[in-house]
């Protein structure tokens, strides 16, 4: 009896094992078949999509945009026929393949080809499919929908994207802001900046890449953004104005540096140094005497880029009395201030404080100036 029980149990175990193995093989075969079919659909979609994107039509879209859009319709109809997309069903594998391939290419196209791609996303209903996802309860769905909206240049999504700038999830806020800039271009920058309440370091990194690509066109919008109520946004705008280096930003920087927010003041000083406008000299002089060490350091570094002899007296005081980092910044600024700065460094090379002497001698050496008795002074 026991032997019979063991035999039956062994047989059942072998049967289940064999059934599982067969199921696994079937699953792998089916997955491989689906992957092969998907790959074939993608190849076909890419082939016919290229025909749509690069067929010659007139007129110039910049001169007659409405007529140009009208001339795209026969090409879109032909693409629908070529891919057999007479059904708008979302489950249609050919439709999914077209969307997948188009999204992959979307980040690589510009100019007229970009216009055609945007029209395609709208024509085939991909934008309509996307809109509900922007309000999904799952944050990762919302974030991915924002990213996709940017790739599609989906203008109908802009109102929802603007609301998502207040989303509870930071990833969603980042993707929404980036998507708005992708869709609206530089015109979307001011609305984004005025809506945001905070900017994490990662968000600043993401957005700054796009904003710097706008170059001087971004300046008026960044000037608007400085008027945000939130210091993080103000500081971000000031940083970028400094990086762009447009002198038209100087008046608003002069206005905002008087705000009693040290972080904003420090960033403004750095921006002044990068821009290099002489109107900043009185401001730099004032902050070289600040009680805040970080503000003195920022002012000294800005002075180095301005290279103005008018600031030499204040820099000389920092070289003699401040900490090492501030002294180095002051000495570098003096070295760039012409004859007045050289005289200050020569004087500093003979004072009693050995650390001051070494700093002064280092910059004099870089300038090719050898004070008398250099060996003894060191």
Image (spheres, grey):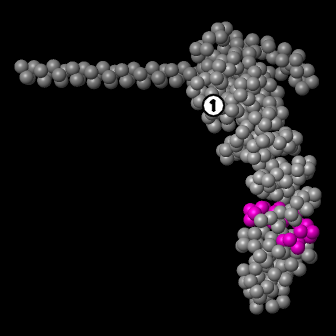
Q: Quadrant of residue 314?
A: bottom right
- The local secondary structure at tag 1 comes to helix
Is residue 131 at least partly visible in the picture?
A: yes
Q: Is residue 140 left or right of residue 345?
A: left
Q: Main secondary structure of the magenta part?
A: helix
Is residue 117 at least partly visible in the picture?
A: no
Q: Is residue 175 left or right of residue 219?
A: left
- Is 109 one of the magenta-colored residues? no
Q: Nearer the viewer, residue 117 or 204?
A: 204
Task: From this view, report whether residue 249 is shown above or below residue 39.
Answer: below
In what quadrant of the picture does the N terminus appear?
A: top left
Task: From this view, report whether residue 73 is shown above or below residue 269.
Answer: above
Q: Is residue 191 left or right of residue 33?
A: right
Residue behind mark 1 = 143
Magenta-drawn segment: 292-315
Q: At which x and y percent is residue 192?
A: 77, 35
Q: At which x and y percent is residue 301?
A: 80, 64
Q: Residue at x 83, y 22 (%)?
A: 56
Q: Residue at x 79, y 75 (%)?
A: 319
């Amino acid at each position: 009896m026991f032997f019979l029980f063991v035999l039956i149990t062994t047989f059942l175990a072998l049967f289940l094992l064999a059934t599982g193995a067969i199921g696994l093989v079937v699953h792998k075969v089916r997955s491989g078949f689906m992957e092969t079919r998907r790959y074939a659909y993608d190849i076909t979609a890419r082939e016919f999509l290229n025909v749509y994107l690069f067929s010659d039509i007139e007129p110039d879209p910049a001169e007659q945009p409405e007529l140009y859009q009208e001339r795209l319709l026969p090409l879109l109809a032909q693409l629908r026929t070529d891919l057999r997309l007479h059904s708008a069903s979302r489950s249609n594998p050919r439709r999914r393949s077209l969307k997948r391939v188009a999204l992959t290419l979307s980040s690589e196209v510009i100019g007229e080809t970009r216009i055609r791609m945007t029209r395609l996303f709208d024509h085939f209903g991909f934008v309509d499919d996307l809109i509900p996802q922007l309000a999904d309860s799952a944050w990762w769905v919302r974030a991915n929908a924002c990213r996709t909206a940017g790739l599609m240049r989906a203008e109908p999504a802009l109102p929802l994207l603007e609301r998502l700038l207040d989303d509870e999830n930071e990833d969603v806020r980042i993707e929404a802001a980036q998507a708005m800039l992708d869709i609206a271009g530089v015109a979307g920058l001011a609305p984004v900046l005025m809506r945001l309440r905070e900017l994490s370091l990662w968000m600043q990194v993401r957005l700054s890449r796009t904003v710097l690509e706008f170059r001087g066109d971004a300046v008026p919008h960044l000037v608007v953004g400085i008027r945000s109520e939130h210091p993080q946004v103000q500081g971000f705008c000031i940083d970028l104005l400094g990086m762009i280096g447009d002198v038209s930003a100087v008046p608003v920087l002069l206005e905002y540096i008087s705000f009693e927010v040290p972080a904003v003041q420090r960033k403004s000083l750095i921006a002044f140094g990068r821009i290099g406008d002489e109107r900043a000299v009185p401001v730099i002089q004032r902050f070289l005497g600040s009680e805040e060490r970080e503000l003195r350091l920022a002012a000294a570094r800005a002075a180095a880029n301005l290279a103005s002899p008018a600031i030499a007296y204040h820099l000389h005081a920092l070289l003699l009395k401040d900490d090492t980092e501030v002294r180095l910044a002051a000495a570098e600024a003096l070295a760039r201030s012409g004859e007045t700065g050289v005289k200050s460094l020569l004087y500093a090379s003979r004072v009693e404080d050995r650390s001051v002497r070494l700093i002064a001698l280092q910059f004099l050496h870089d300038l090719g100036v050898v004070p008398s008795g250099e060996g003894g002074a060191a």
